[in-house]
Image (cartoon, rainbow, N blue to C red):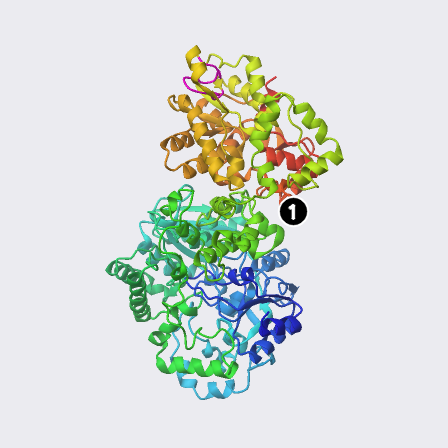
Amino acid sequence: MTDLEAALRRAVRGEVGFDTTSRALTTMDASNYRRVPLGVVAPRDADDVAAVLEVCREHAVPVVARGGGTSIAGQATGTGVVLDFTRHMNRLVGIDPEARTAVVQPGVVLDRLQDAAAPHGLRFGPDPSTHSRCTLGGMIGNNSCGSHSVAWGTTADSVRELSVLTARGRRLRLGREWSGAPEGLRGLVDGELARLRTGFPDLPRRISGYALDALLPERGADVARSFCGSEGTLGVLTEAVVGLVESPRARALAVLGYADEAGAAEAAAGLLPLGPLTVEGMAVDLVPSTEGLPRGGAWLFVETGGDTEAEARTRAEAVVRAADVVDALVVTDPGGQRTLWRIREDASGTATRMPDGSEAWPGWEDCAVPPVRLGGYLRDFRRLLTAHGLRGTPYGHFGDGCIHVRIDFDLLSADGVARFRRFSQELADVVVAHGGSLSGEHGDGQARAELLPRMYGAETVALFERAKAVWDPDDLLNPGMLVRPAPLDANLRFSVLPREPVDVEFGYPSDGGDFSAAVRRCVGVAKCRTTSVSGAGVMCPSFRATGEEAHSTRGRARLLHEMLAGELVTDGWRSTEVRDALDLCLSCKGCRSDCPVEVDMATYKAEFLHHHYAARRRPAAHYAMGWLPVWLRWAARTRTTPVVNALASVRPLAAVAKRLGGIAGEREVPRLAGETFSRWWRRRGGRPTEGGDLVVLWPDTFTEHLSPSVGRAAVRVLEAAGLRVALPPTLRGRAVVGDGTSRSALALLTARRGQVCCGLTYVSTGQLDRARAVMRRTLDLMAPVLETSAPVVVLEPSCAAALRTDLPELLHDDPRAARLSARVLTFAEALERHAPDWAPPEVNLPAVGQTHCHQHAVLGDAADRRLRESAGLTGELSGGCCGLAGNFGFEAGHYEVSAACAEDQLLPAVREAPDGAVVLADGFSCRTQLEQLAGVRGRHLAEVLAERLD
């Protein structure tokens, strides 16, 4: 234990973390930069902050204040002690509806403030796209803005008073008329009035540098406003009084289509006199699908407000009439507006991938120019990109002249980094030539501070240094930011990664087979850190259960990054820090779809576990749960199922078995079916009926041994729809599809019996060699099916997802894997595509439950929604993850997190269900969780429909 760590532990009541994990989680924010801190402190209150500052001052160690860690310029990283305000100092102290103010601590997430203000008809004006995870402290530090800044300004416009601790321990209450100003600040300003009146660009999004002009007497000498945007370099915020604005009772969204981004940019400023709430712009490059958008190659999202829906719509229609557009759409439905806004909010993540899949990075994320000059600036910007052979797609706050863009810089090679530097210098000159600010929202940080002399001149930058010295004479707070900055091409986070591809098992097709590139996908926008999900969203259930960064997708990606770097995490694949962070990953695959850059932590976890336990003894649960298909087949073939069920019902014996198998003691062992699905199929005749299209019904492990009623129901429904149902062959040889026998005695003698398996349980436990062997055997068995055009219908969503993604990505060298993957259909997809004229029986009941997380992430549920609607099943299924997640919820040590995940959405939805509602749960894990935690029987959609066939 170092002297610094020991001193902090004595002085601070909050957590002090100098361990590898704590440090690794804070090496990066959402920028291109990386710094390794000495330690992390989560202060409980202002007294703790003061104690940290005193100890660090005595040890001459820098202090960096950190909120949600979503800063894009590197200002939330540092080499000293990082203050994490999200753990304890995250309270909303109070709201005064009459005064329209709120008192907040720096770690409170913006959405929590918005939720608390909404019942009073109020809201906080600025709303960055990271509103679900960014903190008020970070917003004040960066002077954040968001899409509504054309109506309600920047964070500085909403700040009333700030409680601040200086590096030397002074407690100040900052406000107007020099309130709280440190000694020497007023004298500094009085001596530079002319410079402050003439040396700062006049535009709505001027965020760069210190806002010293807010201290002018004609501007109220507002010390609190001047502090905004100082990036933690002047003092440490401990509490803030912020102003709230009246939220319109109704809103409408006009989406205006233009031929290209230049047309949209030219039009934006002309719409401002109409008083819109937003004027946001983006081009087609950033839109995964243009479905639901008006025609065009670029769009403006213009929001209007009113006391009534009619008033808001009237204003939106006036915007459409005033705009010269290719096409337009006005949406007043709140759900429709949220869907469209999600497209815009996810742009910060989707922009990190070019249309061809290559990487793009921040660095010139948010320059701003006067709105009337935006069109000209974008043309010059495009020319500069072309001259340097770079690509990027601008989007952002067109109404404020603020442009976000990710550019495909090569930050891995010396030549690429040199080009990054040259481009940055030349673009800074272009921005200044248009009267703009190097930063229009996210601050300067390391990305732009070096270039501030090009914007302000050397004398004004020297004034910034003098102001910093007044506040922080010891240069203790976030040194290297804003003044005396590090070079913009130093401390790049990519420089520590291996240059040669890492030897891995999965193919990582979207990352060129490079595991490092897959890990680099995480850019830190932290959508995984949201405390609630909307609609069918899933990511990240373990973070919502624990609130710990290590259990977020971003946190795990950071640890994998440090594992590859080898500086902090030094034992590579054997790392216990990475193992422990991945331990609570449910492998729900939610990040694969919900993360804007499609980080796939379930795959990374399987990859890591494979290497971590190579040639080593595994946890007991890996053998008990990972080899579940073997144990269940063994019980079925030896006809010992009744014995197994009887023994499992004896509590002392079950407790011993669970302990030996690494299974949570709180769990009940599910009963095995008395007759497997395949045995029922053979007893029934084992051949497809005459009729329409042939479909091959996949007997997954769960349907086969644990819930064959689902398989029987699916056969009834598929046949009622006029389809011919077959099962996969069970003999490797010249087998006839569906009958499990052979036409010749010779074939019977030479063929080998087997059973298809997707390999899911082996993949989820990281037993990839075994998974590969099982999958190859399955492909051998499926050879006759692949020679036909028959689809493969999979009832268990997790098995269908494994066949769709894990199979071709793990067997990327076997073309049969891709062919089988392309054949996989869900139950609803099979009915929709192969029995389009069939009408399901009418159920006409409300439905509750949860869309399976793997279905949401990999398969999609559009066909299921349409099938439910046709059957008269009303209502929306919840999102999230049930928390059982295959083997996860059964493993010892996971029960509490598993139950917490179920309480997130699934169990409340079921408890609040109307009388007579059908509880739908297509996954065996979901049904088991419902039964064990709520005493409720969930049913597969096939069972519900089959019941009504009579």
Does 889 appear above or below 814? Answer: below
Q: Where is residue 685 in the image (x, y as percent from the top left)?
A: 54, 12
Q: In this view, does 267 lie to the left or right of 641?
A: left
Residue 740 forms part of the magenta stretch: yes
Q: Circle 1 sits in a helix, a strand or a loop, which is it?
A: loop
Q: Name the residue under label 1.
A: 893
Q: Where is residue 160 in the image (x, y as percent from the top left)?
A: 57, 72
Magenta stretch in the rendered image = 727-742
Task: Please tell me which residue lies in front, 330 or 941.
Answer: 941
Task: Please tell me which residue lies in front, 920 or 16.
Answer: 16
Q: Where is residue 304 in the image (x, y as percent from the top left)?
A: 48, 54
What is the magenta segment's predominant secondary structure?
Answer: loop
Task: Please tell me which residue lies in front, 227 or 3.
Answer: 3
Q: What residue type is labelled 1?
A: Gly
Task: Please tell me which residue lies in front, 932 or 307.
Answer: 932
Q: Is residue 36 left or right of residue 195?
A: right
